Image (cartoon, rainbow, N blue to C red):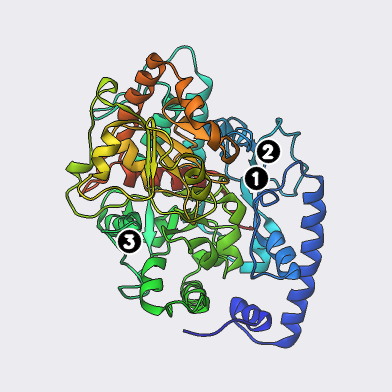
Amino acid sequence: MRDSSSSSSSLTWLHGHGKKPVVLCLVASLLLVSVMVLAFDSKTPTSWFSSYYYSPNLSSRDRRSADALSVTSSSSTLGASSSEEGVVDQFYSSYASLPPTAAPSPAPVPAPAPAPAAVYIRDSISEAAIQLTTGPRRRDVKLEKIELDLAKARAAIRDAISNTNNRSALADIDYVPQGPVYRNAYAFHRSYLEMEKLFKVYIYEEGEPPIFHDGPCRSIYSTEGRFIYAIEMENQMRTRDPELAHVHFLPFSVVNMVRLIYEPNSHNMEPLRRTVLDYINVISGKHPYWNRSLGADHFMLSCHDWGPSVSSTNRHLFLNSIRVLCNANTSEGFNPSKDVSLPEINIKSDVIAGMVGGPSASHRPILAFFAGGNHGPVRPLLLKHWKDKDSDVHVTEYLPKGVSYYDMMRKSKYCLCPSGYEVASPRIVEAIYLECVPVTISDHYVLPFSDIINWRAFSVQVSLEDIPNIKNILMSISPRQYIRMQRRVRVVRRHFMVNNPPKRFDVFYMILHSVWLRRLNVRIHQED
């Protein structure tokens, strides 16, 4: 694979020639457009990348250029205050303000005033960015058809949101989402059915296993390998014609890169970054799809802690592409308006029956339980305040020999799920499997599927400052309310189940649905 580390060689490669006058002209154009786009952004209430941008590998000049070339945002709201759970709320309300057609305005205009404390993205690619990336080209009829179909899906979801009074449940032979575990159950169901009817994923065939088209299926990072395997086996939503795809999947495994090309204890991630950079150079040089959208209709998936850092090696992958990450840490650049929080599930065998199910509230004598290593910024605080200090709040580093971890979770009303080195914890899904109400303790963590699922209906969120008050917080929840929460854990469990083959509404299809939602909020503009 070739090296394109220098900016001049990257420009030459992007445009397919090496003539110096043309390159200088393009650089001048890029600087002009950067100034224009940044001037426009200064008038926009909330910039798409302003709250979440982070990349230690980009200089301030590259950062400005990346801003000018990144996906731009619109006034479509993704919902709630970032101070509540640190996640977007009521995702579907965004579609109420989306335009009915896919064609963007010929010239950018300032967006309407935002709702208070909301997260925003615009729903089109910057026209100037497309011109710089692709240059003049003939009309792409298939792309127009894709964008028209997505516009119809937006309209259907918008109609599902607005018709709140006279509506009956949508017909479904398997499952009809209902109840408070969903932010908007009816809109979610409509969106899911639209996805099943329309959504197509293309998987790039470049690269060979085990770094590509492969991943771990039995480990704390198992969701990475399970997804890669399932999407490559999928028949309904996978397409082998890239012209028909709504999104393009980059099938590399960061976990396997760490296992095979990382030198242990070196703290040098450069070989991983170079592999990803070279891979994107190969697919963007061989196919037109990356360049036409600057990666905005592409997605990667990684459950390794280093996924965000590895993705920062390419600014368009970091800024524009949909990054499906277990390490959904907003302080490290995770952007919930375009990125997807991937559940971390520690699967040790192909049979997970022993991980599922638990007794009722009356057969759970322990108020709260945690057992785990003392590492990261959160667990030392938890262990300091609660380790071996209270029989109701059972907190320890190591369980005695012969004591089952899962049995302890089954005996507990609440399962404490503090962050470790990174924000995600497999205990959250383990608690859901075992019908133990999760108590998440993590700053900057975007909980999985939180644009669909109302986590406050079936879990408890505790800030680091409130760790000393955990017992009081949990004791203040009435027995009746706890029973409701536990029943809701049982309802929401289907969305975290790992099945082989996947089943409708399970974790595999929920991940795809999260990607689908973010693709709906991107429109690829092509010039005439």
C-alpha separation, residue under disc 3 versus residue under disc 1:
30 Å
Q: Which of the two discs, 3 and 1, labels the residue nearer the N terminus?
A: 1
Q: Mark 1 sits on what residue?
A: 122
- The answer to whether residue 433 of the structure is visible from this angle is yes
What's the residue at 36%, 35% (across, down)? 193
Q: Mark 3 sits on what residue?
A: 240
The three-letter amino acid code for the residue at tag 1 is: Arg
In the image, taking residue 273 as reference, residue 217 lies left or right, namely: left
Image quadrant of residue 105? top right
C-alpha separation, residue under disc 1 versus residue under disc 2:
6 Å
The three-letter amino acid code for the residue at tag 3 is: Arg
| Secondary structure type for disc 3 | loop
Q: Quadrant of the C terminus?
A: bottom right
Number of numbered markers: 3
Does the residue at mark 1 contact the one at mark 2 (Cβ under 8 Å)? yes
| Secondary structure type for disc 2 | loop
Q: Which mark is residue 75?
A: 2
What's the residue at 34%, 31% (across, down)? 492
The three-letter amino acid code for the residue at tag 2 is: Ser
